[in-house]
């Protein structure tokens, strides 16, 4: 089992939508580490709406927003 497979299993088992590195990047569960690596500061996170001003991407992954629960 690879490290990426271990990460995917953990995310799925715990209800996360993907990974994010604060201020750097994010990846959805279906496309973990498309760059070929997981950064040291990646955190498990939840899919969030993308505000209109994002422009070059259509999603955000971040910490759980208590107001969306």
Image: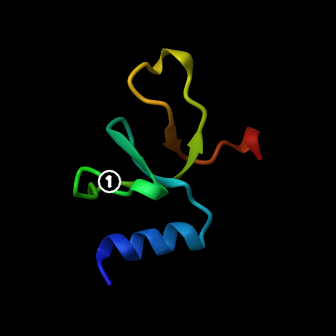
Residue sitting farthest toward the bottom: 1
Q: How many marks?
A: 1
Task: Characterize the local packing of mark 1: few (<14), some (14-19) or many (20 or more) Cα atoms within 10 angstroms.
Answer: few
Q: Quadrant of the N terminus?
A: bottom left
Q: Name the foreground residue: 18 vs 66.
A: 18
Residue 34 picture location, percent across and down: 29, 52
Which residue is located at x 40 percent, y 54 percent?
Answer: 31
Q: Quadrant of residue 17?
A: bottom right
Which residue is located at x 31 percent, y 55 percent?
Answer: 33
Residue 38 lies, with reference to residue 69, above or below; the image says below
In-image side of 7 versus 60 (left or right): left
Mark 1 sits on what residue?
Answer: 41
Q: Secondary structure at mark 1?
A: loop
Residue sitting farthest toward the left: 36
In-image side of 68 versus 54 (left or right): right
Residue sitting farthest toward the front: 30
The structure's colour scheme is rainbow
Q: Quadrant of residue 57?
A: top left
Residue 49 picture location, percent across and down: 60, 33
Residue 41 lies, with reference to residue 12, above or below; the image says above
In-image side of 45 versus 7 (left or right): right
Residue 35 picture location, percent across and down: 24, 50
Which residue is located at x 29 percent, y 78 percent?
Answer: 2
Q: Name the foreground residue: 28 vs 20.
A: 28
Residue 13 lies, with reference to residue 48, above or below; the image says below
Which residue is located at x 28 percent, y 58 percent?
Answer: 38
């Amino acid at each position: 089992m690879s490290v990426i497979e271990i990460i995917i299993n953990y995310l799925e088992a715990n209800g996360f939508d993907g990974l994010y590195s604060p201020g750097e990047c994010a990846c959805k569960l279906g496309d973990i580490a498309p760059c070929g690596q997981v950064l040291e500061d990646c955190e498990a996170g939840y899919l969030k709406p993308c505000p209109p001003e994002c422009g070059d991407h259509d999603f955000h992954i971040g910490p759980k927003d208590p107001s969306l629960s």
